[in-house]
Image (cartoon, grey):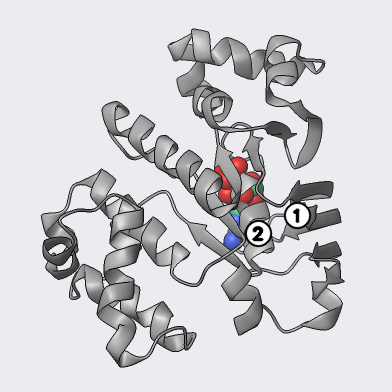
Amino acid sequence: MELLRLSKITKSYRSTGLIRRKEPVHALRDVSLHIDRGEIVGLVGASGCGKSTLGRIILRLEKADRGELWLNGCEMFQAEPRGASFAYRSLVQMIFQDPFASLNPAHDVAYHLARPLLRHGLVTRGELESRIHDLLHMVGLTPVERMARAYPYALSGGQRQRVAIARALAVNPKLIVADEPTSMLDVSIRMDILNLLARLRREQGLALLLITHDLASARYLTDRLIVLNRGVIVESGTTEAVITNPQDPYTALLLDAIRNPRLERRLS
Ligand SMILES: Nc1ncnc2c1ncn2[C@@H]1O[C@H](COP(=O)(O)OP(=O)(O)O)[C@@H](O)[C@H]1O
Ligand SMILES: [Mg+2]
């Protein structure tokens, strides 16, 4: 069943430097896609192609110039023109590339999880601790009592990203947009986080939009791939079809990049 649909999303940025560029940057042009419930879709493309812009528009942290965003069959830009409502936030959550920057160093893990639970009125004070422990358990941060009291600086990169995932899960979302969630982590830890996301889909029926320039991660985790090049979707299909038989020359180039690390550095 369809969860999210974007129709002809277009977004440009005007340059705002001292020397004003005449040409705006066309970050996204007529981008249309859908994500079904419980589906893991990869959004791949080189750096600067518009992936994060699309993620922010889905989160409604930013507004598109044109186009429609449908969630559960309801067009959102019309229904809530001023940005994401509380209700929207409880359905769509995001995790970012840098888990350290997204956590507050002055507060422990429990605080980060308590905030969304209390703000969204999901628990009473009495239920709070056990719900925090449930969330920590769900993302594999154990022993939960000790992890709840830990501060971000005392955690590894992988553990911090697990906290960020637990915080996103706190409001029981149906969709998580993950923008390069493993690219700042050690290679050995990346797989653990990808496996965690796969398990959450299996156990909770969560849908995921995995934004990445890393086709290897996308191949491992996703059902379907959407390839973006300079703000335009150049190819989409099942992950296996796109990877084994790319129809677009740009996709073929991205695939070469996985096999040739020097080219990858240039593209990312
Ligand atoms: N807030 C902004 N102001 C101006 N230009 C931006 C802004 N955000 C993104 N851009 C530009 O839009 C394009 C797409 O950026 P982005 O969505 O961050 O790409 P990606 O995540 O694929 O690396 C880039 O050319 C970038 O410079
Ligand atoms: Mg980005």
Q: Can residue 231 be seen from the camera position used here?
A: yes
Say which of 203 and 246 sits in front: 203
Is 206 positioned to the left or the right of 127 in the image? right
Some atom of ligand 1 lies within 8 Å of the CB belonging to the residue at label 1: no
Secondary element at tag 1: loop
* Three-letter residue code for mark 2: Ser
**Image point 51% across, 22% down: which residue?**
216
- Give coordinates of residue 169: x percent, y percent: 46, 63
Badge count: 2
Counting other residues with Cα less than 10 Å from the Cα at mark 1, is it few (<14), some (14-19), or many (20 or more)? few
Residue 123: which quarter of the image? bottom left
Q: Is residue 74 above or below residue 87?
A: above
Image position, residue 172 (x, y; %): 52, 68
In the rendered structure, the answer to whether residue 34 lies left or right of residue 179 reads right
Q: Are marks 1 and 2 in contact (CB under 8 Å)?
A: yes
Residue 4, position in %: x, y? 76, 57
Q: Is mark 2 within 8 Å of ligand 1?
A: yes
* Residue topped by disc 2: 15
Q: CA distance from mark 1 to mark 2?
A: 6 Å
Residue 185, label in figure: none
Question: Toward the viewer: 206 or 255?
Answer: 206
Q: Which mark is residue 24?
A: 1
Residue 182 seen in render = no
